[in-house]
Image (spheres, rainbow, N blue to C red):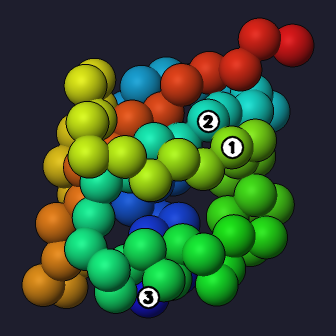
């Protein structure tokens, strides 16, 4: 499931026209099962998505919803200044 999340987040990143070398902070709202996936594969997310910080939050203000299998994820990507 981690790879599916990475693919979906990369597609959203592309939709936002974010440069491939730009680091981002990722804020997500999801269920306990996917929170565990994010926690267990945090290093993989950091490497594959150039993620600086991961925040689990009930309030994703600006973002989108992604569906992975039976799970809905609200996600927000925030570019990090260099």
Mark 2 Cα shell of 10 Å, populated few (<14), some (14-19), many (≥20): some
N-terminal of the pair, mark 3 or mark 2, is 3
Q: How many marks?
A: 3
Q: Does residue 39 show up?
A: yes
Q: Quadrant of residue 47?
A: bottom right
Q: Residue 20, position in %: x, y?
A: 71, 35
- Left or right, residue 11 beside residue 78: left
Q: Residue at x 65, y 33 (%)?
A: 24
Q: Residue 36, position in %: x, y?
A: 48, 83
- Left or right, residue 37 beside residue 70: right
| Image quarter hosting the N terminus | bottom left
Eye-nearest disc, 3 or 2: 2
**Residue hosting label 3:** 1
Q: 15 or 82, which is in the foreground?
A: 82
Q: Secondary structure at mark 2?
A: strand
Mark 1 Cα shell of 10 Å, populated few (<14), some (14-19), many (≥20): some
**Residue hosting label 1:** 53
Q: Secondary structure at mark 1?
A: strand
- In the current view of this chain or complex, which residue is farthest to the right? 82
Q: Residue at x 25, y 74 (%)?
A: 31
Q: Residue 54, position in %: x, y?
A: 60, 50
Q: Residue at x 68, y 43 (%)?
A: 53
| Image quarter hosting the C terminus | top right
Eye-nearest disc, 1 or 3: 1
* Labelled disc at residue 26: none
Q: Does residue 20 show up?
A: no
Q: Are marks 1 and 2 in contact (CB under 8 Å)?
A: yes
**Residue hosting label 2:** 25
N-terminal of the pair, mark 1 or mark 2, is 2
- In the current view of this chain or complex, which residue is farthest to the top? 81
């Amino acid at each position: 499931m981690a790879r599916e999340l990475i693919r979906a987040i990369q597609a959203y990143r592309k939709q936002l026209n974010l440069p491939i070398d730009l680091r981002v902070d990722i804020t997500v709202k999801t269920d306990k099962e996917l929170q565990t996936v994010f926690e267990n594969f945090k290093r993989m997310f950091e490497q594959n998505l150039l993620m600086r910080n991961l925040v689990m939050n009930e309030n994703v203000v600006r973002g989108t919803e992604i569906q992975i299998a039976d799970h809905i994820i609200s996600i927000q990507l925030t570019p990090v200044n260099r």
